[in-house]
Amino acid sequence: MTHHVEKKVLPLWRIPAMRQTYVILGPMSLIFSAGVFMGTSTVMMPQLKKDDSDIYVSESMSAWLYSVNGIGSMPTVLLVPYISQWKGYKLTFVLICLPVIIAFILHLFATNAVHLLIAGLCQGVTMGGNISLGIISITEYAEPRLRSFFLVMKSASFFWGIWTGNIIGTFSYWRNIPLLGIWPALFALFSCIIWPEGPYWLASVGRIEECKKSFVWLRGPENDKDELAAIIKNQTKNSDNSGKSNLVSKIKKSAVCRQFYMPFAVNCVLYSLYQFSGKIVMTVYALVIIEDITKSESTAYAGMLLIDGVTVVGMYIGSYVAMNVRRRNMFLITSAVTIFFLYVLCLYLSLVAYDVVTQNNVVSLTLLVLYTFAVSWGPMVLSTSFTSEIAPMRFKAFIVAVGSCVFWGLQTANLRLAPILMANVGMHGSFGIYGTFTLLFWIYLYKYLPETNNKTLQELELCFVKDKDKRKMDDVIEN
């Protein structure tokens, strides 16, 4: 006689993947709002320069409005990881939601350029805080098989927001953009009411029973007991050790630990490749770049929206592919293709600049689209995923804080200097410089970037530790 075991069907809200998705929707909605705000600058500046504009913006102020969000983000990325370790993720997330809401209100009622500048600084605060806290929370709340998918989707949400802002600004006045952009930020603000605190954080502050409940709430009753035991053991040990030495002593011991300085160096190089692959400059200055190449304003707007769409589609394709292949190989291959198209653009635009060939709008836009697709579904979608995964838990706050500060410092400098670079070496020279920088960073990452696919955070902590150094590392931790 055959006995059939009846499988229990859980309500939708009880399914662990749905609960994890709900938690991650908070940071994703917030980064979408930040993207909408950033997309505003691209379409707002040409409208403000028209004679009938209600706000006067000088050329120098215009350059600052493009890049000021990076300045607002740098203090936040240093503070947020430590505030979250002190007070937990829920309160910290509420604090970083508020500035972008204020930024949208300022945009809606701005009467001068100073209001726009302050709004940009506020948006930078949210961007910097969400980059830091979003990375930490996703790596803690999501299980390994979903973690990279969520990280990739979070990155895609930012560019989806930029595309949305650009669409609204292309077909209507820029003040209409805040009317949409503020709502996802408000959802993010109220969504965290029913979050549990992160199990890693709860274990690190000694709240073990709450840690177990949080882990079960996120992963379900049939969760991985070994992973929970490892979380409690590792985080409790790290918490105990934190009281045995002062901050200066801890920094000195960390600085000579390969498990600290190697992932930190890799993170900085990943951030550098992200910035100097040229995609952020291409996104923010899309209208300027495409109009300079094609000499047509209508083509510039159409090309901007096309490239924004290709960016979003490429990132979603990348998020799917990344779940089914070795992500390190995917990153290196797509980065190499990105370098190829940067040099192709450099060569083609050089031939146009020296009147060897005649500029053709179809050829120019095709090359820009191919470059955009290559950089979007590889480097742009995987760089931030790697940086969040390879930072060891006991160093994560410091690595994420300083690494994010490097990220925003590079972005501010990149966006501020881009007009100067394009004016002095032309579009062809700019693409060549970005290609060379990307190639140098690629060589370093080819040697040191580890594979992270389907590995737990505990397994990833061992990626940068040589066998002969494991005993030394343990001594450093214990002392």
Image (spheres, rainbow, N blue to C red):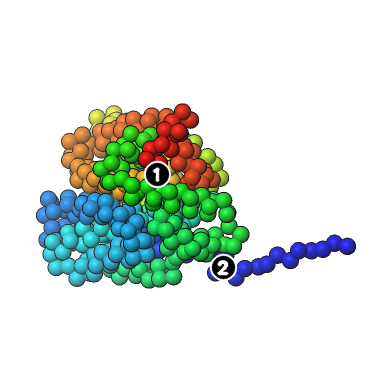
* Left or right of 196 in this view: 13: right
**Mark 2: which amino acid?**
Arg
Query: Residue at 43% across / 46% down in the picture?
Result: 389
Q: Pick the residue in front: 353 or 96.
A: 96
Give x and y (percent) for residue 285: 26, 48
Kindly state the secondary structure of the residue where label 2 is placed: helix
Query: Residue at 47% across / 42% down in the picture?
Result: 460
Circle 2 residue: 14
Q: Pick the residue in front: 212 or 44.
A: 212
Query: Residue at 43% across / 38% down in the picture?
Result: 474
Picture quarter containing residue 270? top left
**Mark 1: which amino acid?**
Ala
Give x and y (percent) for residue 191: 41, 69
Q: CA distance from mark 1 to mark 2?
A: 31 Å
Picture quarter containing residue 444? top left
Pointer 2: residues within 10 angstroms few (<14), some, or many (20+)?
A: some
Circle 1 residue: 391
Is residue 94 visible to the viewer in this orientation of the structure? yes
Q: Pick the residue in front: 178 or 56.
A: 178
